[in-house]
Image (cartoon, grey):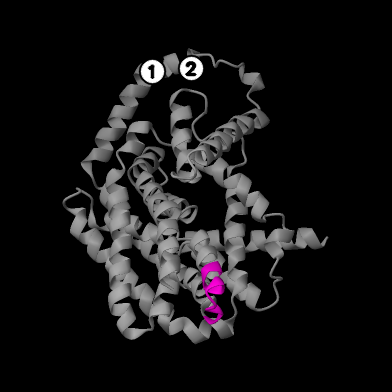
Amino acid sequence: MELLLYFLIVMVFLFLGEWISSLSKAYIPSVFVTAVLFVIGFWTIVPKDIVTKANFGPNFAAICVPLLLVHLGTMMDLKQLLSQWKAVVVALAGTLGTMILTLTIGTFIFDWHTVVAAVPPLTGGIVSVALMSDGLKSTGLTALVAIPVAMFITHSVIGYPLTSIMLKKEGKRLLNSPDIKSNQRFKTKNDQKLGKETKEREPIINSKYQTAAFLLAKTGAVALLAIFIAKLTKDVINSNVIALILGVIFHQIGFLEKQILNKAKVFNWLMYGLLAYVFSQLSTTTPKVLSGIIIQIIVLIILGIIGMYITSALLAKPLKMSGPMAFATSLTALFGFPADYIVTNEVVSNLTNKEHEREYLLDNMLPKMLVGGFATVSVASIIITTIFIKLL
């Protein structure tokens, strides 16, 4: 009974986030609302280990992250993925802008150790928080251990809504673009030409054997291959990035179906579990600790976001990206996957319910958000954190 109660509480926090996001037309993202509910819960009556007891702990996350990334890869084509070098440049430049402003202006206002402890979690995710917390403990700066966690909590409060606003601006721009009409005409003609051929084409394995377990097994095999390749290369390329790329490749060659986890009917379950695990990290802080460092955190976040805005604005025109899209891509450094996927999907769902418009918006925004998030949170933030630990 106790375990089911914990599971229920986690699901209530998640669906309330979705409802409020829908009511606000995605101006208030669900991940932001759910994060706030978890924080309030942890500070009052919710057990700190509620997520683990609901069976969404570290082991669950370790399985579902590579599976979800392979799945997201099946939603893109190889050409589309390779063309996102501009998103990588903008995202990394935004991270550089954040470091420049925080390490210059920030160190004039606050002491060096406070800034160094706060910046990596500002430009990264959970892994950066864990690495910096361990680094502070090992160097004897235990009084600053709360800063990385507080930064992780607080920058989401600003980052999620701001990203949602930028994506809504970009989405509205795209919906008014003449390209969306020509894109629909092209798809209609293409469907008319290839529809019959697609219907008559038989899969290699008979459709009656295409069970959910079989689809999950295929996804798991590709995810395992990604981890194996990462280990062979000694993590020169992060396994998350490899999983995304392999998802694209194996979909292109016909081994994986498009949106394979949706076909297996487990996508939402895995996504909810991953979100619950991410929010469980919020249990490590307290109101007392947060109130003592909140001013430093907010000032550094503002400086960091200004740095992202300046660099993205400078690069938008030369790289032929709109200002809002470039800024949103830079902002992925604040949270990364899965929040970048969820915020983008929510914005698109609230902008239109027409399938061809949804596809057009997702094709133009989601790859940039995902690749930008991987470039910053999954790759650059690890390097930055490692360097900053040595600066303590």
Left/right placement of residue 259 relative to residue 284 reads left
Query: In the image, which residues are magenta?
Result: 134-143
Q: Count every numbered label the image shows and give the total.
A: 2
- Residue highlighted by disc 1: 194
Query: Quick one: 150 or 272, which is closer to the camera?
Result: 150
Quadrant (top left/top right/bottom left/bottom right) for the N terminus? bottom right
Tell me residue 131's x, y (percent). Answer: 52, 63
Give the residue type at disc 2. Lys
Q: Secondary structure at mark 1?
A: helix
Q: Is residue 139 magenta?
A: yes
Magenta segment, prevailing SS (helix, strand or loop): helix
Q: Quadrant of residue 304?
A: bottom left
Q: Secondary structure at mark 2?
A: helix
Tell me residue 381's x, y (percent). Answer: 42, 58
Which label was assigned to residue 199? 2
Question: Which residue occupies 72% across, 58% down?
Answer: 54
Query: Quick one: 351 or 227, which is closer to the camera?
Result: 227
Question: Which residue occupies 54% across, 69% down?
Answer: 133
Regarding residue 195, the answer to whether it shows in the image is: yes
Tell me residue 113's x, y (percent). Answer: 42, 78
Quadrant (top left/top right/bottom left/bottom right) for the C terminus? bottom left
Give the residue type at disc 1. Leu
Outermost residue to the left: 318
Tell me residue 166's x, y (percent). Answer: 32, 60
Q: Earlier in the sequence, mark 1 or mark 2?
A: 1
Question: Which residue occupies 69% across, 70% down?
Answer: 48
| Cβ–Cβ under 8 Å for marks 1 and 2 | no
Q: Quadrant of residue 187?
A: top left
Q: Is residue 270 magenta?
A: no
Which label was assigned to residue 374? none
Quick check: 107 above or below 182? below
